[in-house]
Amino acid sequence: MIPITSSETLGKVLRRRRKDLGLSQTAAGEKFNIPQKTVSTIESGSSSVNLSTLFKYMSALGLEMQLEPRAKAASDEALW
């Protein structure tokens, strides 16, 4: 499992998955009627992406999200 702690990391992971599946941004987006430009925005790590769109794109790539506690780090307090 890959730890994802930022929108940039999530975008990179999604891009790698799409490429591993041999899909273009257009082809991946077409699976759930997501425009190529939106796919590009997601993969660039933009934090302005609608959550429902993000989940639809993850589904198009055969992925799901699971959350689990992580070891406490000094920077965690800034997240809450």
Image (spheres, grey):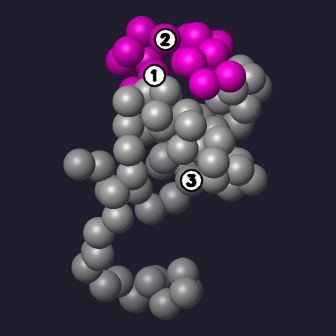
Indicate the quadrant containing the C terminus: top left, top right, bottom left or bottom right.
bottom right
Identify the residue shown where x is 55% and y is 34%.
57
> Is residue 23 something one can see in this rendering?
yes
Q: Earlier in the sequence, mark 3 or mark 2?
A: 3
In the rendered image, residue 53, in percent from the top left (x then y), is placed at 65, 42
In the rendered image, residue 79, in percent from the top left (x then y), is placed at 54, 81
Under mark 2, the amino acid is Leu
Cα distance between the residues tagged 3 and 2: 21 Å
Neighbours of disc 2 within 10 Å: few (<14), some (14-19), many (20+): some
Q: Does the stretch in magenta take in 40?
A: no
Q: Are marks 3 and 1 in contact (CB under 8 Å)?
A: no
Neighbours of disc 1 within 10 Å: few (<14), some (14-19), many (20+): many
Q: Say above or below: 17 vs 49.
A: above
| Left or right relative to 17: residue 72 | left
Name the residue tied to disc 3: 7
Cα distance between the residues tagged 1 and 2: 6 Å
Q: Main secondary structure of the magenta part?
A: helix
Identify the residue shown where x is 42% and y is 9%.
22
Q: Quadrant of residue 68?
A: bottom left
Q: Quadrant of residue 5?
A: bottom left
Q: Earlier in the sequence, mark 3 or mark 1?
A: 3
In the rendered image, residue 23, in percent from the top left (x then y), is placed at 49, 11
Res. 18 mark: 1
Identify the residue shown where x is 56% and y is 18%.
31
Under mark 1, the amino acid is Arg
Q: Are marks 3 and 2 in contact (CB under 8 Å)?
A: no
Q: Which residues are magenta?
A: 16-33
